[in-house]
Image: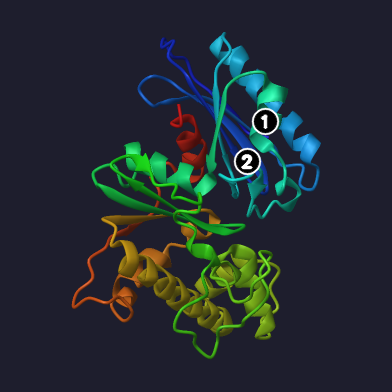
């Protein structure tokens, strides 16, 4: 568990919760957008009731810091279906098919707003992050899963079906010999997520005979000079460039901001600018690809900005 706090005189609070596959984080923002308090706990994966109680505990901690009850914004994998109101498309699969909004309002006894975690990330970076000076911001999550969110003029574009920005469940374009097609949890095969997520990256490497426990080890060994891991990282650079080229061809955003654990790979920001031109339908490509200004707390900040 990580806990941080600092004094503030503001009484205008925003409370956000980022419900991730490995951790749940809550944060209080003051009226200036500064983080005044935050706390993280491990996600009780596979236990829906325990997830609800973990969120309740975090909100109680936030209220103790603020001295008042607050509405809460929550970023979550997947999205609420506009038709049924049930959560769907979450890679934390125990939440799929659940009335998450109603359950949280019942458990927390307060108003709740829910948005996709990638939308929250994109909103945070568009409001006061790496895309603050741009009109059209595409935010990418490449971590446990792969997602995206689109913000235009600081407003999230959810779309008619609440799937705006869900590029991770399109097929990997312009496939190469080293692209290993595997099933995705969504029921399809060859989704971008199966290549670009941390678990997908590691699984693809293992399928090509590189024995590694996780993506972090591939990167570390590549930096240390391991030839086969350097090759795997090069494949990843190319796969990410192809996937983002589709986004640029469709949306032509002013900036792309990368988030999630894989966004910490420093070589991405050196490699992508030179590779995008091979795939984007334009005679030049100058779309900036930036790391997040708010790091791995950008999602929880965006959830707080829902109010």
Numbered badge on residue 85: 2
The residue shown at (50%, 35%) is 303
Q: Position of residue 61 (x, y in %)?
A: 65, 20
Q: Is residue 100 above or below residue 93?
A: above
The residue shown at (66%, 55%) is 91
The single residue placed furthest to the front in the displayed view is: 83
Q: Residues within 10 Å of mark 1 (few under 14, many from 20)?
A: some
Q: Is residue 212 visible?
A: yes
- For this view, does 174 lie left or right of residue 108? left
Quadrant assignment for the N terminus: top right
Q: Is residue 219 above or below residue 134?
A: below
CB within 8 Å, label 2 to label 1:
yes
Q: Position of residue 220 (x, y in %)?
A: 56, 67
Between 1 and 152, the one lying in front of the other is: 152
Q: Secondary structure at mark 1?
A: helix
Between 223 and 245, the one lying in front of the other is: 245
The residue shown at (35%, 40%) is 155
Q: Which residue is mark 1?
A: 102
């Amino acid at each position: 568990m990580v806990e941080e706090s600092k004094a503030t005189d503001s009484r205008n609070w925003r409370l956000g919760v980022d419900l991730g596959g490995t951790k749940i984080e809550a944060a209080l923002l003051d009226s200036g957008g500064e983080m005044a308090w935050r706390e993280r706990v491990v996600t009780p994966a596979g236990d829906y009731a325990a997830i609800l109680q973990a969120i309740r505990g975090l909100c109680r901690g936030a209220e103790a810091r603020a001295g008042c009850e607050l509405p809460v914004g929550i970023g979550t994998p997947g999205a609420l279906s506009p038709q049924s109101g049930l959560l769907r498309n979450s890679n934390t699969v125990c939440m799929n098919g659940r009335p998450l909004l109603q359950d949280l309002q019942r458990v927390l006894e307060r108003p709740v707003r829910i948005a996709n975690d990638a939308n929250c990330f994109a909103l945070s970076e568009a409001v006061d992050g790496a895309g603050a000076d741009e009109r059209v911001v595409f935010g990418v999550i490449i971590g446990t899963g792969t997602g995206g969110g689109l913000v235009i003029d600081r407003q999230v574009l959810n779309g008619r079906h609440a799937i705006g920005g869900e590029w991770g469940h399109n097929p990997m374009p312009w496939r190469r010999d080293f692209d290993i097609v595997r099933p995705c949890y969504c029921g399809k095969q060859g989704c971008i997520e199966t290549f670009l997520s941390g678990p997908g990256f590691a699984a693809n490497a293992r399928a090509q005979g590189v024995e590694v426990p996780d993506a972090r080890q591939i990167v570390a060994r590549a930096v240390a000079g391991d030839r086969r891991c350097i090759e795997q990282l090069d494949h990843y650079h190319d796969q990410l460039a192809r996937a983002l080229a589709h986004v640029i061809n469709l949306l032509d955003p002013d900036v792309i901001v990368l988030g999630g654990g894989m966004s910490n790979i420093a070589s991405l920001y050196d490699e992508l600018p030179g590779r995008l031109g091979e795939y984007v339908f334009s005679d030049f490509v100058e779309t900036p690809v930036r790391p997040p200004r708010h790091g791995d707390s950008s999602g929880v900040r965006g959830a707080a900005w829902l109010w």
